[in-house]
Image (cartoon, grey):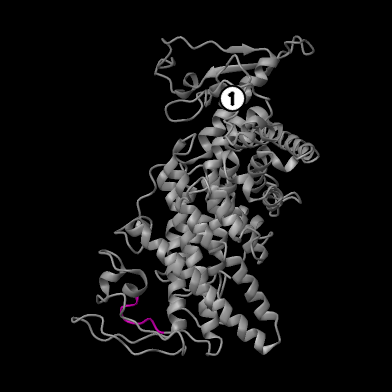
Amino acid sequence: MVGIPTRSVSCLTCRRRKKKCDKTAPTCLKCEKAGLECEGYTDGLVWVNRTVDNRPKLQVRLRQQQQQPDSAHGQQLVLHDDDSNTNSSSSPDGSSPDSDRARPPDILLPAHLARSAREQLYMGYFGSTLLAAGTTIPSDQAMSFASMGWTKHIGPLYETDPAVRSAAMATSSAIIATLHNDKQLQVKGIQAYNSSVVEMVKGLQRTNWYKRDGLLTAARIMATFELLFISKDKDTPEPLAWRGHNQGQQAIFLARGPAAFATGPAHQLYSDARINMVMLSMGQRKRSPFASPAWDKIPWKKHPKAVKDELIDMMQDVPEILEYIDEFKTSTDPHRRQDLEMLIMSRCNAVRADLDAWATDRGESLQRFDCFANIGPIEPPKNDVEFAFHHMTTIYWFTAGMLACIKSFFTSRYGEERIPQRPPGWYTTYGGAAAGTPASSSSPANNSSYGYDDDSHSPASAVSASSTTTTAPSVSVTEHYLWESAMYATREVYAMGFFFMPDAGVAHSAAGLMSLAVMLRYYLHPAAFCILGNEVEMVQGLYSTPILGIPIGQLLRRILGGHLPPLVANTDGPRMSHGLGWF
């Protein structure tokens, strides 16, 4: 990745306005004072050393000249074309099929140029493997569905911020080393990562350190590195773990305040980090510090909220609900417990109503990866937009599933633990019917075929499904929420594999790990229910799937603190329980 050379070192905005630039990095102060978005100091970045399939065409190896080990030219970079080694088969006479074609000569570069060329090569590979479908810059539509837009700022900040430069080189080196099992390059990646930590410490010691977009970007890259590459042979992450980097980003956001993220790269960095901030608060089971009117509105004064931003607005209420649940479980005051129960159910209903409205606006598009709305196998995502929409859909599913689990808990506390029988027409009610799905063996029924009483916690009167069907038995409100949570978990399982396809990209796979860790909470509980029967086997099958050579099961053990509990689920029906996964 290189910047197109220019004669001026002023920022692009000042050059376009023909104003004198103060050349402050990463954004000039003159632009900030004028209320303009500083576009940085490069004319744009291009990924080099890439073929039409978005993969680097050149290979790199360092050759030490044995004759002059101490000379200035002792270490050189040898670049050679991949095509010279791709066809290794020989003809019967022992000659190569391409022997008549002259082999391109090696390009020998001195050490000072070798470093630059090597960085270009590695960053080219980094750019082509980071995002889905080989894209190097996320499309506008993809950025509206998933939190990948921040990656477009890596290039400009790479040129101006040492922490971003070291973090990007560490990750790119680790990706190449892992894919090619290059132990030497793995060491180089660790060394580059250590350099990024040093640069991060230096940056934090500077005046107004929290105003640097480079620190936020470097922390995001370093979190991915820690998640995928640190302690590769261990089941637990190092003390400086990926969670720590998310906490560092949170501290920077809060120090700068919401107004600092209304324009420029800072807005994109905050917008795309919100999902990680929500997940961090969910893990802490504490109200998100960003769940306030100021943080919900000020950063979007000049930017309309994207589809994913609206979804994350709703997710930000879930950590506070979890905090209330923990207080409910520990409180001994019956009046306080009653108040908390009413508050929790009220908040869950409000969030669910917002989710339903959001889903209605999406229409049938939400069925794209829904196993209950597709005939036969689900078609994989084909481009970066579909991968982004897939990620957003799974976030919607596990958020709705968590709310259903919470509501089942508070509606079943006074009942006995039991397994409800699978009611007739269950599939049509809880998953929708599509030709060729399990519903084809059931009698058709509409979505109102089951009644339940949300106030009495008891079965409501049955309603007629249609003129051609028999009256179906009603289910209690608790049974309804148990079935509903099982449906969302099933959808997650059948769509989860798309996160880990070869074309998914490193960033999408890392996001999939977090979604998988959340979904596992459902199937780790004795009350979990397999609607289609093989969900547990499918999840266990994912454990052996590698991300950059590391099995997902090993990465999950690290995320879950070193222990990967056995999955437990049944096919008889969801058990009534005083606690059920996902919360």
Q: Residue 516 location, x and y as percent?
A: 54, 58
Residue at 67% from the left image edge and 28% from the top image edge? 160
Residue 251 vs 566, above or below: the answer is above
299 falls in the magenta region: no
Q: Residue 225 location, x and y as percent?
A: 65, 43
Say whether residue 486 is left or right of residue 267: left
Residue 379 vs 478, above or below: the answer is above
Q: Is residue 59 visible?
A: no
Q: Can residue 513 be seen in this view?
A: yes
Disc 1, SS: helix
Q: Which of 96 and 10 is in front in this view?
A: 10
Q: Residue 249 location, x and y as percent?
A: 68, 48
Residue at 62% from the left image edge and 52% from the top image edge? 555
Quadrant, the C terminus: bottom right
Q: Name the residue under label 1.
A: 14
Q: Nearer the viewer, residue 46 or 26?
A: 26
Q: Which image quarter: residue 282? A: bottom right
Residue lying farthest left? Answer: 468
Q: What stretch is highlighted in magenta?
A: 421-426
Dot 1, crowdedness within 10 Å: few (<14), some or many (≥20)?
A: many
Quadrant, the N terminus: top right
Looking at the magenta stretch, what is its main secondary structure?
A: loop
Residue 248 vs 466, above or below: the answer is above
Say whether residue 334 is left or right of residue 395: right
Say whether residue 461 is left or right of residue 16: left
Q: Residue 489 location, x and y as percent?
A: 47, 66
Give, as a three-letter code, the residue at label 1: Cys
Residue 163 vs 85, above or below: the answer is below
Q: Nearer the viewer, residue 72 or 281?
A: 281
